[in-house]
Image (tube, rainbow, N blue to C red):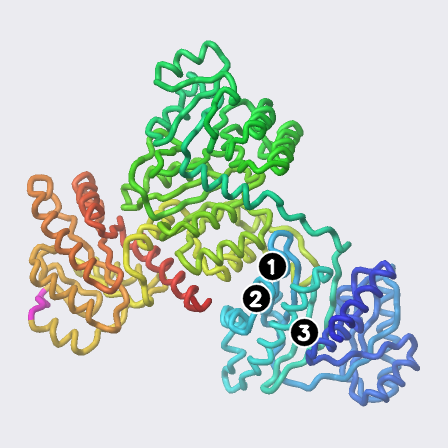
Amino acid sequence: MTDSIVSSVISSARSSGRTVLTEIESKRILHSLGLPVAVPDSAVTADDAVRAALRIGFPVVLKVLSPHVSHKSDVGGVELNLDNESAVRDAFERIRVSLAAKARDARFDGVAVQPMAKRGGVELIAGTFHDERFGAMVMVGLGGVLVEVMKDTALALAPIGGREASAMLAQLRGARILRGVRGQPGVDIDAIVSLLETVSGIAATHPDIAEMDLNPVVAYEDGLAILDARIVLTADSGRASQPDPHRAARLKNLERAFNPRTVVVIGDKRMGGYMWLRAMAHLKGKLYSVQIDPNEIPGIEEMGVENRKSLAEITEPIDYAVSAVPRQIAPRILKDCVANHVGSIGFFTSGFSETSEELGIRLENELRDLALNSEIALVGPNCMGLYSPSSGLRNFPEEKVGEAGDVCFISQSGTHTINFCLQAPSHGIKVNKAASIGNVLVLEAADYIDLMAADPATRVIGMYIEGVRDGRRFFDSVRHAAERHPVVIWKGGVTEAGARATFSHTGSLATPEAIWQTVVRQSGAVEVASLDAMLDAVELFARAKRLGGRRMGLVAMTGGQSVVITDTFATAGLEIPALSESSYDELKTFFNIIGGSYRNPLDAGGTIGAGHHQGNLDRILEILERDSVIDAIVLEVGTGLRAARWAAHEDEITGLLDKLADFANRSTKPFAVVMHPAHVEAIVARGKELARARGLVVFDSFERAAAAFRTASDYWANRARLGS
């Protein structure tokens, strides 16, 4: 019954050429959903308005009816608390005159007459809107000044359940108002949660609805009331995008490409230093070159690579090809690959839609059409392609090969892909698979996420993303991956300057940045804002134990450092609790409090000799390990005067690191060390190398350590909230 009313109202509006429903039509839909809303009577004349008021009972409210007015109060179109017939007549006339004066071209269709809402309560705004990438979104915010000036709103992808609706309310800066503050009673949270669930569900199941604007909604101690509502339809129902009929085969071909038996490099040249052929020098499978320029062939053969004049001359099935040809030739190369049943091809070639040139856009469209009509997995173009160390497949000559890893990385930037993969080993990160995906013509980030998340070797997935076409599929893929592994996302191009106009009121309160942050949070992933932060977070996820909370046990070497480490971690949103009494009872039996303190943070330099009084250090770490108020432990390893000895006495640092690695392996809690470069940077760099070789997590500074632990705590909190 509900769905038939919704469809009937929408059909009636479309048949009359309207995309904006009247307040009465909007409220009919909401009423059919069981929501607390009074459906007004329409009145074309003042007499009609009086008769409606008598039926409803005084006091009443009059609101202008006009297809050309979005915000009724702006045109003097709302009259409140009318308690007799004369007041209703006078109000009707004031509304008519005010509309004519303030919106001369607006048609006057009369007024809506409805009961006056009871006083009190907390005013909210709620509703839905349609984002061009991610589809139906639901929004809630505190009404009045808080939403207009402070933009105190929360978003979620629709549909949502009660847990997500409750989480939205908790995100509001004014959430305390809903619970009651300064003698004011709290409101019916369950009723608001039910409202958000309902409107999000109808928006998700009815793509014709572009926006629902419920403003205001008044929440009381018991229940709520929707006082005004406006529903906007899409300009047309549109056509749903057609699924890729070759997707399953395409993904199989992409999987083959990461572990190829045969790779072909097309068009590599001496001028580029034969970069691609050099990158494939340690390939476990067979490598061929395809090059027709007689001036290039001798240099290729000098490298020990077999060259062919065409793909047809290669008899083995080709799993992966890399093309470095000019853009004008790219469609011809792709057509040849399809004809010769090449599984995947990565186009290093650039100069397509990213240039905004007509030629580049046309050539890119040709590539897309050719790929979509085949089973080939097209990587890019405008990318560095695939990296799989265990198979010897590289997209840059200096990347490490040979050892299978447990971290995957996806990036729309080739530079970020290379930088991550080159810096990963020095952070103790072992790459499993990496993909530079460029312009994502056919295969999107979601395809790579699905493949990498399904790999049993994967422990962490990181990615740099600038944009997605199919936002819902991206969200679903990230959410599925984040249920199993930490997913760390670095988003490029999210600023207020990127904001674009949306629909009238509810949608205009959402910016691209806010929508993106909502997608990441709701998917269960976490965000970082730089390559360094990405490397730090991935190292912690991949090498440390699971983080069970935000309570940190901190050990510093001096008084000043103990203050700084505390401020840094607290500023990052982490907790530094007092230890349990049993811990203090044990610490005071041996801790040197002259120039030190054991209050968490522990100013322990005098007690542990910058880490070299191993017995005392062991006891401190074991106390923190046993203490139930501590979730993770961070130790500053002295890198001042003591570190200067390490160059000549490396056994001092290796002995310490062996003990710390043993503790990290035995501990049930995440453990990390901070080693500041200080004035002995080269020596400390060697210390970090030795530490990571032993599996220890190492950070360059308190700031980077705190940021990584905050990222980790956010991920595990998200995962707990999602119930996984």
Q: Quadrant of residue 145?
A: bottom right
Is 379 above or below relative to 20? above
Query: What secondary structure is found at the residue carrying circle 2?
Result: strand
Q: Earlier in the sequence, mark 3 or mark 1?
A: 3
Residue 153 - label: 2
Left or right: residue 606 versus residue 526 is: left
Left or right: residue 657 versus residue 218 is: left
Three-letter residue code for mark 2: Thr
Q: Position of residue 246 (x, y in %)?
A: 59, 43
Q: Earlier in the sequence, mark 2 or mark 1?
A: 2
Q: Position of residue 219 (x, y in %)?
A: 62, 80
Query: What secondary structure is found at the residue carrying circle 1?
Result: loop
Position of the C terminus, as image quadrant, is bottom left
Stretch in magenta: 590-594
Pointers 2 and 1 in contact (C-beta within 8 Å): yes
- Extreme residue toward the front, this view: 315
Residue that appears at 71% across and 77% down: 227
| Residue located beneath label 3 in the image | 216
Residue that appears at 46% across and 60% down: 524
Q: Earlier in the sequence, mark 3 or mark 2?
A: 2
- Tell me which secondary structure the magenta stretch mostly adopts: loop
Pointers 3 and 2 in contact (C-beta within 8 Å): no
Is 134 covered by the magenta stretch?
Answer: no
| Residue located beneath label 1 in the image | 510
Query: What secondary structure is found at the residue carrying circle 3?
Result: strand
Left or right: residue 587 versus residue 718 is: left
